[in-house]
Amino acid sequence: MGTMLALLLVLSTLSGCARETLTDLKNALPEPAPREIFYQLDYSSYEESFLDYKGNTLAYCDYTVPQMSALREDGSQILEAQNPEEERALELTETFNLRFADWRADAPRIQELLAQAPAQNGQPLVEQLTCTAYQTGRLVSVSAEYHNYTGGAHGNTILLSWNFDLDSGTFFDAATLDDDAGFHAAVVRALKRQAQNRAQENSLSPTDFFWEDYEEILENWTSYAVSFDEEGMTVAFSPYELACYAAGEQVFHLTYEELLPHMGPHGRALLGLEEETEEASEK
C-alpha cells in the first residue's frame, strides 16, 4: 500500500511538472506577427441617359468615383473578417466608400433636376463627377471636378477634395496638419505670393484680377479644395470663389520642399515625408 501511494505521488509530481513546462513553453513563444493588410483603390463608374419619346437626350449623368478594398498579404480581398484587424479594415473601407456611395448607386440628382426643369433650348441637362486619387502608406487624397448644366448661358464647375487617414480611418481637414509648426501661415504667404504673380502676369492688380477680399479668402484656404499628390499640395478655388467666372478656376500648387520646413511631425508622418526630412537633415 505504501509503495502504491509513493508511486501516485511521483506520477502527480511529474504531471504537474509537465503542465508547468508546457505553460512555460507557451509563454516563451513569440506572439504571431500581425498579417499586413493592404488597401487598394479602384474606380467605379455610373453613366445613364434620359430620353424623351422621340429618342432625344433630355439629360445624362456620368460619375467616376474611387472605391477602396482591403487585401490580405496573399492578395485576396477581405470580404469576411477572420480576426480583429480584418474587422477594422472592413470598417475602414466602409467609412471611405460610404462617402461616395450615392454617386455609384444611381442618378437621383439628375432625376430631380429633370423633374424640375426640362432640357433647355434643346441642350440636355448634364451632371458629371470625375475623381482622381493619390495614395501613400497612410494617406488617400481624392480630388474631383463636378460639372452640371441646368440651363442658362453656361454650366457650373465645382472643385472638390477628400483626404483620408488610413491609420485613424477618418477623413481629415488640412487644418489638422498645422500642429504649431507654422504650416497654415506659411501656406497663406505662398498663396498670396502666387496670387500676386498671377495678377501681374495678366497686367492687373490683385484686387482687379481677384475679388477685393481675396487675401481674406486665401487665409481661409483649408475651407476649399485641398488635395495632395506626388509633388506637393494643391489648393483649388472653383469659379466665382476667388475671382469672376471669366477668370476660371484658380489652382495653386505648393511643393513639399516649400512645405516641409513648416510641417510638424504629425503632418510629415501622415504625408509619408519622414524620409525626406531625414535626408534633408543629413545634408
Image: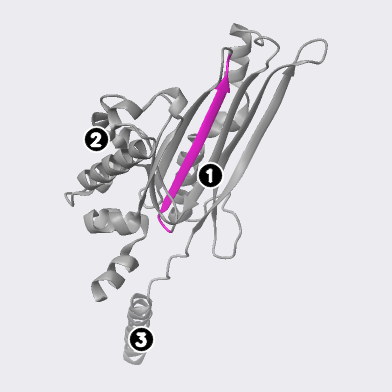
Residue occupying the point 83% across, 11% down: 54
Does residue 267 sit above or below 46 in this rendering?
below
* Circles 1 and 3: CB atoms closer than 8 Å: no
Mark 2 vs mark 1, CA separation in Å: 26 Å
The earlier-in-sequence mark between 1 and 3 is 3
State which mark lies toward you, 2 or 1: 2
Secondary structure found at label 3? helix
Amino acid type for the residue under numbered disc 2: Glu
Secondary structure found at label 1? strand
Does residue 10 sit above or below 117 in this rendering?
below
State which mark lies toward you, 1 or 3: 1
Q: Position of residue 195 (x, y in %)?
A: 32, 38
> Is any atom of residue 173 visible in this view?
no
* In magenta stretch: residue 52: no
The earlier-in-sequence mark between 2 and 1 is 1
Amino acid type for the residue under numbered disc 1: Thr
Does residue 262 sit above or below 145 in this rendering?
below
* In magenta stretch: residue 144: yes
Amino acid type for the residue under numbered disc 3: Leu
Q: Give the range drawn in magenta.
A: 137-150
Near-viewer residue (181 or 1):
181
Does residue 177 sit above or below 278 in this rendering?
above
Q: Residue 219 carries which label?
A: 2
> Is any atom of residue 276 visible in this view?
yes
Q: Position of residue 91 (x, y in %)?
A: 46, 44
Q: Residue furthest left?
A: 180
How many residues crowd around disc 1 within 10 Å: few (fewer than 14), some, or many (20 or more)? Answer: some
Near-viewer residue (194 or 69):
194
Q: Which mark is residue 132?
A: 1
Residue that badge 3 annotates: 14
In the figure, residue 117 lies in which quadrant? top right
